[in-house]
Amino acid sequence: MAIGYLKRRAALMLAASAAALLTFNTAAYAEGFPERAITLVVPFAAGGSTDVVARVIAQKMGDALGQQIVVENVGGAGGNLGADRVARAEPDGYTILMGTVATHALNPLILKTKPYDPEKDFAPISLLVIVPNVLVVNPQLPVNNVAELIALLKKEPDKHAYASSGNGTPLHLSGELFKSMAGVEMQHVPYKGSGPALNDLLGNQISIMFDNLPSSSAHIKSGTLKALGVTTAERASSFPDVPTIAETVPGYETYTWNALFAPAGTPPEAIAKLNEAAKTALSDPDVAKRMADFSAKIVGSSPEELKTHVSEEIAKWGPVVKEANVQMD
């Protein structure tokens, strides 16, 4: 009996020692992180809005953390290659992702083969910014607002088409959601990127387009394109005179967003430090100015709020993808 008591006592002491060691290691990790440079994977080519946001944020986050954040562009497969790389990375906080609505809502819904689970394979860090899309038309189209466009499309249901940056992109599905909610028909013409689509819109080869507001801004200001409405729930600060589509089609809302994710299993202490650094970066006046330059609305959410946001985005886009019958290999 004495031997059994001693064994139990020894086991309890061992468990207590292990718990103390774990607590010490966790505290030491939290205090020491980061000890080296962090890689921020951008799952698209350099030069786009996601890349711009990443580079602006990375510099200021690095300043806050005392370590460099190196931006690495891993483009391909609509963002899936870069996202999958981070999902499979060591969950130590030193490899993170600049995710978007494409990587964490649309691609998982559209692709037949899904390389990762957007909710189970990632640890949310922070929703950084929301970027409006915009409904633009060639000035020769005889409409001046969303209501007039809807009336024209209902009068001539088989005559008009809209351009987007490609099949399955947020801009394509912005158009499909508009068709569904406004009760109109338009043919979708996918392009290989916004640039070629804008060229045809400017040349009046096609008359309607859903685009990211930053890439259309210069054309709207010069009058070579006419903005009928932004896709966000509120008007864009850079174009306060352009109404929202929701002012005519209640409940309509789409946007592009950028958020930080780490691989699932990343220590909470690392997530907390990265979240704090992201919020510090977003509060910097220079960052705020750069974001305002291309109409990005700063959010700076908690990890829990980003987790909820991703779930809501998947739920919102699921029916749209199904109705549009969009599937890709």
Image (tube, rainbow, N blue to C red):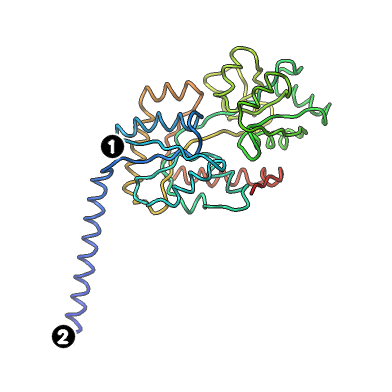
Depth check: give the residue in front, 305 or 265.
Answer: 265
Query: How many C-alpha atoms fall within 10 Å of the one at disc 1: few (<14), some, or many (≥20)?
Result: some
Percent position of residue 203, x then y: 70, 18
Q: Is residue 188 left or right of residue 116?
A: right
Image height check: is 287 above or below 314?
above
Residue that mark 1 sits on: 67
Q: Nearer the viewer, mark 1 or mark 2?
A: 1
Image height check: is 186 above or below 240?
below
Quadrant where the N terminus sits is: bottom left
Residue at coordinates 61% horizontally, 48% vertically from top-left? 109
Percent position of residue 65, x then y: 29, 37
Residue that mark 2 sits on: 2
Q: Quadrant of residue 155?
A: top right
Residue at coordinates 76% horizontally, 32% vertically from top-left? 186
**CB under 8 Å between callouts 1 and 2?**
no
Q: Is residue 254 left or right of residue 152?
A: left
Image height check: is 69 above or below 264?
above
Q: Is residue 148 left or right of residue 70?
A: right
